[in-house]
Amino acid sequence: MTSPRPSSRPAVRLIATDLDGTLLRDDKSVSERTVAALAAAERAGIEVFFVTGRPARWMDVVSAHVHGHGLAICANGAAVVDLHQGGTFLEVRPLARPAALDVVAALRAAAPGTSFAVELTTGIHYEPDYPPFFLDPGATVATAEKLLYEEAPGAAAPVLKLLAQHPELDPDAFLATARGAAGHLASFTRSSPTALIEISALGVSKASTLALCCERRGITADEVAAFGDMPNDIEMLSWAGRSYAMGNAHPDVIAAASGSTVGNNEDGVAVVIERLVAEALAERPSAADPR
């Protein structure tokens, strides 16, 4: 006989984890303990989804650690990609260019000095004043209005997200200002410690795309455990039946999560996964169990 599940909670069938500041250490590595925990989860029949603000082209850091389905949710829910196929796009939830142009106009008025970048399925392009994290030799440098213009509507590459950066504003204040000015046009969030906002189509978030992926698998929110550290994780942590804020998490993330773990540099995700795997194995009938 097996002991009853603590609090009679549904067993976890899927783990959804953010990457930067969560699964990854600050040096962007995946520790040996975390690699082992991810593999143990898959062996225990628990699916693992990486759910990140990163674009597909920046997923090489974890592509070797995806098992089973090979899927990841990128760009804050704007894309589902197959990491077994080099980051092939399987589904895109784009930001319409007219809406993106309206957002640009609204933020230029509400927060003068804002500069923009445009993340497409084909790569990133940015304005002259935008400080890119990584220089992309294939990027076009022009105004956001020019980057978003298309001669034939619907013919250009889909926009995954718009990025807005301000050189002076407090990050949380900038996010609040942007939502107040254009929250009816798109979804706004942030994951950077600087005043950098990430803008997706209205209703698109890590949570909404994860919910769609789970629904297709017959997995309910109560059967999901989620991990995160920044405001772009809040909806996902609020949706999941079990959610864990990292020890290094933003205060709003800590408030939204139902649980917590130690920081990313202390392998906080692995600490919880090990416990979830042990719980899953304890729930399985043994060979001697007549059930």
Image (spheres, rainbow, N blue to C red):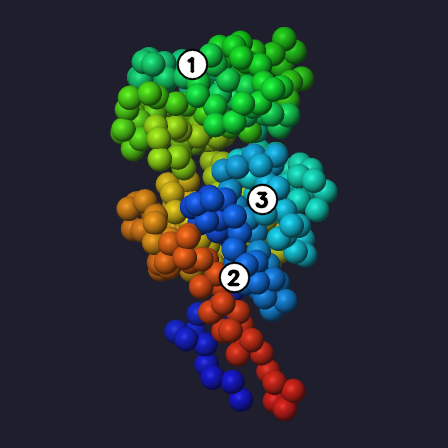
Question: Which secondary structure lies at badge 2?
Answer: helix
User: Three-letter amino acid code at disc 1?
Assistant: Asp
Question: In the drawing, does residue 282 fall left or right of residue 243?
Answer: right
Q: Is residue 210 above or below residue 13?
A: above
State yes or no: discs 3 and 1 in contact (Cβ < 8 Å): no
- What is the secondary structure assignment of the residue under circle 3? helix
Judge the density around disc 2: few (<14), some (14-19), many (≥20) Cα neighbours within 10 Å.
some
- Residue nearer the viewer, 108 or 134: 134
Which residue corresponds to the image point at 49% horizontal and 21% vertical from the top-left? 117
Q: Which residue is drawn at 47% across and 12% down?
A: 128
| Residue 176 can be seen, yes or no | no
Q: Which of marks 2 and 1 is nearer the N terminus?
A: 2
Callout 3 amino acid: Val
Give the label on residue 33, or none.
Answer: 2
* Residue 3 locus on image (x, y percent): 47, 84
- Residue 109 sits in which quadrant? top left
Neighbourhood count class around disc 3 (C-alpha, 10 Å): few under 14, some 14–19, many 20 upward: few
Q: Do the residues labelled 2 and 1 touch (CB within 8 Å)?
A: no
- Residue 287, compared with residue 238, is above or below; it is below
- Give the Cα separation between the discs numbered 3 and 1: 28 Å
- Residue assigned mark 3: 61
Would you identify the image quadrant in which residue 234 lies? top left
Q: Distance between the residues labelled 2 and 3?
A: 16 Å
Q: Please give the residue where the numbered disc 1 appears in the rendered image.
A: 129
Q: From mark 2 to mark 1, how far is it between C-alphas?
A: 41 Å
Residue 59 position, x and y percent, is: 59, 41
Given the image, on which type of amino acid does mark 2 rest? Arg
